[in-house]
Amino acid sequence: MLAALDCAAVTTTLKPIRTHLDDLVVPFAQAEAIDAELRAIVPHEADERLVRAWHHEPLVHQSQAKQKRAHQREREFWLACAEGLVGDEFDTLKALVFDKLDSIVRASSLGEMVNGLIRPYLHSGKGQITPETLNLIMFYHNHRRYKSGKRQGKAPIALVTGKPLAAPWWEL
């Protein structure tokens, strides 16, 4: 519909989006595959409630006090509903659903993360970053190991490929 406007600025903007469209929708295909896999294992009603609880999980840690409590209440409510539906299998199914959903790479958060990581380098270089420097920054951020959190000791490239790094980033 935007292309039908026949506007040069819109056409220029749409061209790179169209060339990367397949890359942009990868998370959706991954989410559909995980959904199909979970539906075969987890009862539908419980699956929906566990997904809603999972949605509030990161928000509990990211929010300020008032919103944090609201997300905690929501998460606990949906977990209690799911537990009532599946009984003894709750802990196993919750772990399965949360692990599967955590494995989805969300495109917008990746883009924001990259922008946030590169911004200080761009500001310090006054816009004079060479392609080689940008490649080095990219390599560092893809191959450095996380120091804390649930991904501690793993590098972003290792999480995507599933293969552990052979050496620290500076040796590679």
Image (spheres, rainbow, N blue to C red):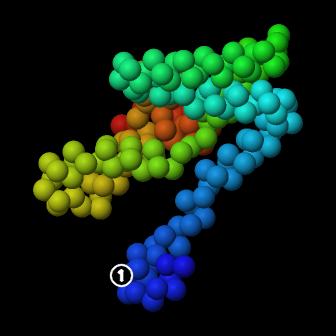
- Give, as a three-letter code, the residue at label 1: Ala
Instruction: Indicate left or right for 27 with 171 as reference.
Output: right
Q: Residue at x 63, y 19 (%)?
A: 77
**Image quarter of the N terminus:** bottom right
Looking at this view, name the residue that lies furthest to the bottom.
6
Q: Secondary structure at mark 1?
A: helix
Residue 79 in view here:
yes
Residue 123's x, y, as percent? 17, 50
Q: Nearer the viewer, residue 95 or 47?
A: 47
Instruction: Indicate left or right for 33 with 65 as reference.
Output: right
Q: Nearer the viewer, residue 101 or 125?
A: 101
10 Å crowding of disc 1: few (<14), some (14-19), many (20+): few
Q: Residue at x 54, y 18 (%)?
A: 73
Residue 135's x, y, as percent? 35, 54
**Image quarter of the C terminus:** top left
> Eyeballing the image, is 118 above or below 147?
below
Q: Residue at x 41, y 79 (%)?
A: 10
Q: Nearer the viewer, residue 48 or 9?
A: 48
State the image quarter where residue 35 is shown. top right
Residue 30's x, y, as percent? 68, 48
Q: Residue at x 21, y 45 (%)?
A: 120
Looking at this view, name the residue that lies furthest to the top.
88
Residue 172 in view here:
no
Instruction: Indicate left or right for 10 with 94 as reference.
Output: left
Residue that carries the numbered disc 1 in the rendered image: 9
